[in-house]
Amino acid sequence: MHTKRIVSLAAALVLGATTAHAQALATFGSAEIAGYGEGSALLGTSLSTGHQGWGPVGTLIGQTYRYRNGNTHNQAWALSPSIGLQYSMPTGAVQGMVGYSFVSDDNIANTGVVAGSQFGGRNSAFVSAQVNHWGTGEHGVQWIGNYAFENQYYWTRLRLNQRFVTAPNPIYLGIEGVLQGSQKETRTANGALLIPTQTRYQVGPTIEYRFTNDFRVGASAGYRGGNNNYPGTGYGRIEFLALSRW
């Protein structure tokens, strides 16, 4: 019930503030697999005013992920609503948000494992920022940064792309880099280090195909490494973005 109240409040705040303007809805999702049996799937939606200048924005993201825990695998999910402000321009947009992530498997935070969630492995308030620049449509720059307070968890991604095939169905090629982990250490009663800070990174090429300007699919693949006691491995991801206004 607490989760439903948070989601309902976020929706009411955004919808109440956008009734006098056109509204814009973005629906997005992705599925990722990696070596050693890890993987994740994400589905989210974002509602904003759809006009230039300042306006409210609300986002709801659901994610499930399978991660290694010693010699076994665990499955967990997270639901993360957030609200904030967005500034839209003809060539891009910036936004800042605050939210709360509800996680089904709170033990992730006690294992020293970077599980792949954007908001960490523990129920926590978080802040998020995003910058998008598309200019004239020839290239694109996107940066997203999240920070969850409870286990000092950060997740950030930078993407750069360039259009290589023009209309009517443009194709963009680019590169992405992801950095995530926890700054929180776990120590024993006598002060000995039990679980150190954890870091994971991903880097690889990207490709995006636009059926229309409002429906896009993409893929990326590359190398995943870090210091969370597992060897590096490859990863692959597919994703989509659907935009609508009314």
Image: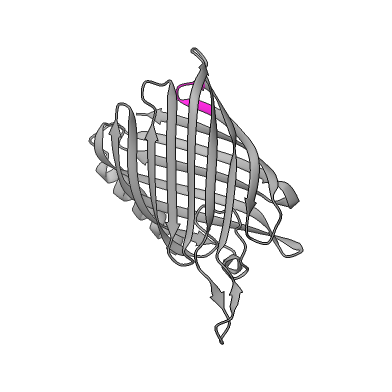
- Residue 144: % across, % down: 44, 44
Farthest-out residue, bottom:
190
Compared to residue 180, the image places residue 25 above or below, namely above
Residue occupying image coordinates x 33% and y 35%: 93
Rendered image quadrant of residue 77: bottom right
Camera-nearest residue between 181 and 240? 181
Q: Is residue 113 left or right of residue 140?
A: right
Q: Is residue 166 left or right of residue 110?
A: left
Rendered image quadrant of residue 33: top right
Q: How many marks?
A: 0
Camera-nearest residue between 124 and 133? 133
Residue occupying image coordinates x 25% and y 43%: 17
Magenta-drawn stretch contains 210: no
- Residue 154: % across, % down: 48, 56
Residue occupying image coordinates x 36% and y 48%: 11
**Quadrant in which the N terminus is drawn:** bottom left
**Quadrant in which the C terminus is drawn:** top left
